[in-house]
């Protein structure tokens, strides 16, 4: 995200939110790999517009939920909508769930490698069959989508011996190292990885989306500022930054 883009959005936000020059708060947002890129850009614009400080705490794997359930100091949590709903039922999140972004799944190859044709379902199927190796996450929403897609295309058995399941790191990092020829993961997780080229999204007929929501943690000591950030995250101004990160706002 270019600094000029964030600054332009921050100026627009000033007409939506009240600058917090006095009594500026410090907020911590818990975010996993699937959404952290978009949250960071939105947080920076919010900081510039309001004077509040936002710390985006990247939590890998089970760390995010461990922090929530142990009441580690934080103000907001981002996760799948059903997880936020469950946290509301538990009393760990207060107020309503707010959906603010979704991410499609795309394909990555090693930087400089030929990009396969994935423009249609049949072309995508051929690309998978022709690849020497294919990587996707063992767990997480995009990994589930990839596994179901293999089943849907009738390729799970054929591709089993050349499928690499990835844990704890972006799939594109495995591709960048040459350990897999093709990688499948959320587009916004692919784009920041050096050494990997983004080929494109899955064909529209095969595309599935991973949804993300945000909630204010009951443990927060800055609930007013946290609610202000939630309001901004679902605003048209934030949507500009979410799109630039490789995600998109939820449909109306």
Image (cartoon, grey):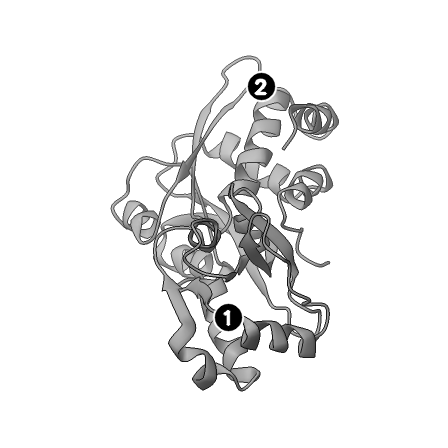
- Above or below, comparing residue 235 to residue 171 in the picture: above
Residue 69 x, y percent position in the rendering: 28, 50
What crowding class fits label 1: few (fewer than 14 Cα within 10 Å), some (14-19), or many (20 or more)? many
- Disc 2 secondary structure class: loop
Residue at the image position 67 percent from the left and 41 percent from the top = 244
The one of 183 and 241 positioned closer to us in this rendering = 183
Residue at the image position 51 percent from the left and 41 percent from the top = 194
Residue 228 seen by the camera? no
Q: Which residue is mark 2?
A: 20
- Disc 1 secondary structure class: helix
- Above or below, comparing residue 175 to residue 46 in the picture: below
How many numbered marks, from 0 up?
2
Residue at the image position 64 percent from the left and 73 percent from the top = 124
Quarter location, residue 200: bottom right
The one of 51 and 171 positioned closer to us in this rendering = 171
On residue 49, the disc is none
On residue 146, the disc is 1
The C terminus, quarter of image: bottom right
Residue 103 x, y percent position in the rendering: 59, 56
Residue 89 seen by the camera? yes
Residue at the image position 63 percent from the left and 48 percent from the top = 246
Label whose residue precedes the other's in the sequence (1 or 2): 2
Q: CA distance from mark 1 to mark 2?
A: 43 Å
- Above or below, comparing residue 27 to residue 202 in the picture: above
**Image position of 234 (left or right of 178):** right
**Image position of 27 (left or right of 252):** left
The one of 134 and 67 positioned closer to us in this rendering = 134
Quarter location, residue 164: bottom left
What crowding class fits label 2: few (fewer than 14 Cα within 10 Å), some (14-19), or many (20 or more)? some
Residue 12 x, y percent position in the rendering: 74, 28
């Amino acid at each position: 995200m270019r600094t000029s883009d964030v600054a332009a959005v921050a100026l627009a936000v000033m007409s939506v939110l009240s600058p917090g020059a006095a009594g500026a708060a410090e907020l911590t947002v818990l975010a996993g790999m699937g959404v952290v890129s978009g949250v960071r850009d939105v947080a920076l614009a919010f900081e510039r517009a309001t004077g509040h400080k936002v710390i985006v705490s990247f939590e890998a794997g089970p760390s995010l939920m461990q922090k929530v359930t142990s009441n580690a100091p934080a103000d907001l949590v981002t996760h799948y909508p059903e997880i936020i709903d469950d946290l509301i039922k538990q009393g760990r999140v207060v107020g309503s769930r707010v959906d603010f972004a979704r991410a499609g799944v795309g394909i990555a190859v090693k930087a400089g490698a030929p990009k396969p044709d994935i423009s249609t379902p049949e072309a995508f199927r051929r690309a998978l069959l022709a690849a020497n190796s294919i990587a996707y996450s063992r767990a997480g929403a995009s990994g589930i989508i990839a596994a179901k897609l293999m089943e849907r295309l009738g390729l799970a058995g054929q591709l089993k011996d050349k499928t690499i399941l990835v844990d704890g790191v972006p799939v594109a990092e495995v591709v960048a190292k040459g350990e897999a020829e093709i990688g499948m993961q959320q587009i916004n997780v692919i784009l920041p990885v050096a050494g990997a080229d983004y080929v494109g999204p899955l064909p529209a007929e095969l595309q599935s989306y991973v949804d993300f929501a945000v909630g204010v943690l009951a443990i927060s000591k800055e609930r007013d500022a946290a609610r202000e950030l939630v309001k901004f995250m679902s605003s048209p101004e934030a949507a500009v930054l979410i799109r630039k990160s490789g995600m998109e706002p939820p449909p109306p």
